[in-house]
Amino acid sequence: MSIFEIIGPVMVGPSSSHTAGACRIGYMGRKLLDEVPHTARLLLHGSFWATGDGHGTQEALAAGLLGFAPDDQRLINALALAKQEGITITFQEIDLGPQAHPNSVKMQLEGLTRSITLIAASIGGGNVLLQEINGLPVAISGTLETLILWHQDTPGFLARITAVLACMQINVASIRTSRVDRGETAITAIEIDTPCPEEVTALFKKITFITRLLVLSPLPGF
C-alpha cells in the first residue's frame, strides 16, 4: 500500500472515506450519466447514513454530481450550489444487505435524455468501487481508464473487442461482462493501462451490437 492509501488523497476533509470517497462516487455517477443530472435520489447505507452528517457525506456526493474534485473548496457548499444549478437531490436511508460495505450508496440519476442506477462503495483512503450499473454487477475502481460498453449478449462479442485492443497494442488490466440473460442486455467493463485512442472508440462504434459506449477516465487524484 502507498502512503496515500493510508492517509487519503488531497481533499476537503474531514474524512477520506466519507468525504473524498463520497465525492468520487458522485463524480463517477455524473460521468456515467454523461450529462448534467436534473434529479438525483441518493440512498445511503450503513455509516454513510448514520455518520454522514458529521463527515459532510451529503455535501461530498453533491459535489461529485456537480463535477467537483475532492480537493475543490466549493465542496462544503455543494448542496446549495446544486440547487442553484437546478439539480434536485434527495437523501434517504437504505439497507443494501449484510454483504454491502458500510460506506455504500445507491444512486438513481436522471438527466434530460437518460437515467441510470448505480451502487458504489467508498472502501477506504478515498478509494471507491462501483459495484452495479442498472442492476448488473461490475467492479470498477476508477483508478484506470475504463471502457464501458452497453451491448447485446452475442457469441464472439468479446473476441471482437479484444482483437481491436490487441491490434492497437492496448494492454487490458481487467475485463468483466455481466448480462440480464442469454442474448439479452449486457455490460462489459474493460480497464486499460493507457488512454484510449479515438481510433478504438471509432471502431467499437461500428459494432452493431453496441448500444452505448463510454470512456471513463481515471477519477480526480488518480
Image (cartoon, grey):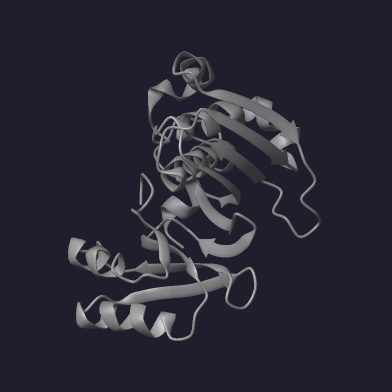
Residue 65 left/right relative to 120: left
x, y percent for residue 32: 45, 48
| Residue drawn 28% across the image and 69% down it | 206
x, y percent for residue 44: 70, 38
x, y percent for residue 130: 55, 55
Residue 67 left/right relative to 114: left
Residue 162 left/right relative to 53: left
Q: Is residue 63 visible?
A: yes
Query: Where 34 falls versus 11 (above or below)?
Result: below
Query: Where 55 falls versus 207 (above or below)?
Result: above
Q: Quadrant of residue 59?
A: top right
| Residue drawn 52% across the image and 44% down it | 25
| Closer-to-camera residue (86/169) | 86
x, y percent for residue 69: 39, 36
Q: Is residue 14 visible?
A: no
| Residue drawn 41% across the image and 66% down it | 210
| Residue drawn 55% across the image and 39% down it | 22
Query: How many numbered marks, from 0 up?
Result: 0
Query: Where 27 falls versus 211 (above or below)?
Result: above
Query: Where 76 falls versus 47 (above or below)?
Result: above
| Closer-to-camera residue (118/129) | 118
